[in-house]
Image (tube, rainbow, N blue to C red):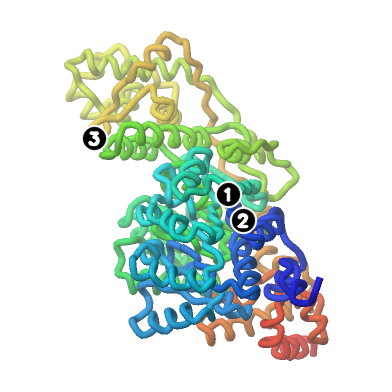
Amino acid sequence: MNPAETDLRPLTLLQEVFGYPDFRGAQREIVEHVCAGGDALVLMPTGGGKSLCYQLPAIARHRAGRGLTLVVSPLIALMHDQVGALEEAGVHAAFLNSSLDAGEAARVEREMMAGRLVLLYAAPERVATPRFLAQLASLHERGLLALVAIDEAHCVSQWGHDFREDYLQLHLLHERFPDVPRIALTATADAKTRADITLRLELQRARVFVSSFDRPNIRYRVVEKDNARAQLLRFLRDEHEGDAGIVYCQSRRKTEETAAWLTAQGIPALAYHAGLDAAVRKRHQDRFLRHDSQDGGLVMVATIAFGMGIDKPDVRFVAHLDLPKNIEAYYQETGRAGRDGLPADAWMAYGLADVVNQRRMIEDSPAAEEFKRGQRGKLDALLALAEACDCRRVRLLAYFGEPSTPCDPLRQNVCDNCLAPPRTWDATEAARKALSCVLRFHQHGGQRFGAGHLIDVLRGKPTDKVAQHHHERLSTYGIGADLSEAQWRAVLRQLIALGHLRTEGEFNTLEPTQSARAVLRGEVQLLLREPAAPAGRAARARTGDRKSGAKAAPIALDTQALERFAALKTWRTGVAREHNLPPYVVFHDATLAEMARRCPASLDALGAISGVGAKKLDAYGAAILRVLDGARD
C-alpha cells in the first residue's frame, strides 16, 4: 500500500482529522462501505455518531479527487454548527440556506463549483430547484460529485414523525446521478417508515445498517399528572439545578407561559416555537446552544419545532409536559438528552387530558382513514409505554424490533419501573361501574358528559351540575365512593387508551365504543398501577449526587485536576465566543477532562488525547499547554 492510499484509510482519517482513537459500533463498517462507493441506509440512535458515517467518506473521496459531498439537512442550526465543527477540524465545508445574503451565497457557490469544498450542507427545498440541480449536473460531468448524504431521512416518509414534503423530491438526485453513492441516515424509524424511506429514495439496493436503539445513559420516567408545573419544578430543583435541559409542550402559548413561570421561580428559561419572530427564535436557540454549564442552568421550553439536529452534548434532561404523538417522536425528543454519554433523564408527566387531546387530534385530522388508522396504532403503542408496569426500556426497544432485558437495578440510569416496581390493582369492576354510569346518562334523556362530571357522580359528590340534571337519582350515583378522584381518572384514562371509551365534540363528552360491551360483561380484565409515592429524601440525594458528579466533570478528577478542568473550560469559553461557536464545537467536556487528568506537558502527549485532531492541535496546542502550566502552579 503506497502512502497516498494509507492516508485515505478511514481509521487514519478518523485519528488525524477528528482525533478519535477508534470507531464506535458499526461506524467502521458503514464508512468503509460508503468509501468504496456503496449506498447505505443507516439507523443509529442520537449521539451514536451518525455524522462521521458520511463526513469521513466525504473527506476520503475528496482527497481521492472525487470532489464534493452534498449533505441534505432540514435545519439551519444543524448546518451552522456542523460546518463550524468541520472547519475547526480543518475540513473545508459550507452551507447554503436562507440565513445567507446574496453575496455570501454567491461566494459559497463559487467555492462549490471550483471543487474546493469537501462538504456542502443544503436544505431539501433548495436541492430540488432547477438552478441547483444544474449546478450539480455540471459538477457531475466533471467527476466532482462524490457523495450524497440525506440526513433525518425519516422526513421523507408520511409514516415518520417529522414528514417534510420537500424530501419527496430527493429521488431526483438518484435519477439524474445514478452512479453517485448515497447514504440516508435517521435516528428513528419503525419497519413501516424504513420501507417508505427505501421506496421513496429508491434505496432498494442499499445496504441497511441498524444499530441498537438503546441509550443506556438515559433514565426513563413517567409520572401521573397532578399539578404538572409543580411536579416539573420539583424535578428541576431536586435533580437538575444548574443543568441545561429541554421542556416540551404541545402548544405555543403553553411554551411561553411555562418559560415565564420557570423564570419567575428562579430557573432561567427561554421559549421556542414556530410562531415567534425569526430573530427571536435564532437568538434563543443560539443562547441555548452556546450556553456553558459554568454559567449555570438554562432551560429551553419548546414545541417540537425545536430539536431536530440539535447537537448540544450536555443536555442533562428532556421533560415532556404533554404527551408526544408517537414513540418515534418520544424517542427522537428524549434522545436529545445525554449525547455526551453521561447520565441524563427523560421525564414525562402524563394524564387523562393527554389521551383525550391526542385521540381528538387524530379523529379531527383531514387525513385519509388509512393514515388515521396508522396514527391510532402508533398512539396506542405510546400509551402502552406510558401505562406500563414493566420495564420501559424493554417496551421502547421492542417497538423498534429490538429484543432486550429489563434494566439492571444496580445501574444509575435504571427506568422508574425497574427502580421501584409499581404495585397494581384490579380495576375491572371499577371500569364496569364507569361504563354503566355513562350508559345511565344516555338512558337519562340521551345526555353526554365529560370525565369530571362522571367522576363526581360515581363518587356521590353533590355538585350543582349533579342537582341540575337530577343525577343523584341514578343507580350509579355514589357507587364509586371508595375510590379517589385520581384513581377514577386512571380508570377513565385506561378505558380511553384501550379504546373502550371515546371522546366527542368540543366538550370531550364520553361515549362507549363497541368493545365496551366486553368490559361490561366482565370479559376484559383491567390492571392498573397504583399511584407512586413521591421520591424520598434518599432517592433525591442519590440522583443529586449523580447529577453533581456529572456536572463537575465527566470523569472522576482529583482536586488539582478539577482546577485544571475549570481553567480549560474558561479558556474554551473565550475561544468559542471569539469564533462565534458553541463551546462543545471547540472541544467536548470529556476531552477537556482527559486533558485535566493527564496534564500533558508536550504537544505529542496532548495530541494523543481523544478528540484532539491535527488541526486543533496545531491551532490550540500551545495555548492549552499554557493553561495547564498556569493551573499547575
Name the residue beneath numbered marker 1: 206
Between residue 201 and residue 478, name the one nearer to us: 201
Q: Quadrant of residue 513?
A: top left
Image position, residue 12 (x, y; %): 75, 71
Viewer-nearest of labels 1 and 3? 1
> What kind of element bears circle 1?
loop
Between residue 236 and residue 219, name the one nearer to us: 219
Viewer-nearest of labels 3 and 2? 2
Name which residue type carries label 1: Ala
Number of other residues with Cα within 10 Å of mark 2, as a class: few under 14, some 14 to 19, many 20 or more: some
Q: In this picture, is 231 found above or below 118?
A: above
Count of numbered circles in the view? 3
User: Quick one: label 1 or label 3, which is nearer the N terminus?
Assistant: 1
| Residue most extreme to the top | 521
Disc 3 and disc 2 in contact, CB within 8 angstroms: no
Name the residue beneath numbered marker 2: 38
Name the residue beneath numbered marker 3: 507
Name which residue type carries label 3: Phe
Q: Is residue 617 left or right of residue 164?
A: right
Q: Which residue occupies 42% across, 14% down? A: 519
Image position, residue 245 (x, y; %): 52, 61
Q: Where, quadrant-wise, is the N terminus in this rendering?
A: bottom right
3D distance between C-alphas at marks 1 and 3: 50 Å
Disc 1 and disc 2 in contact, CB within 8 angstroms: yes
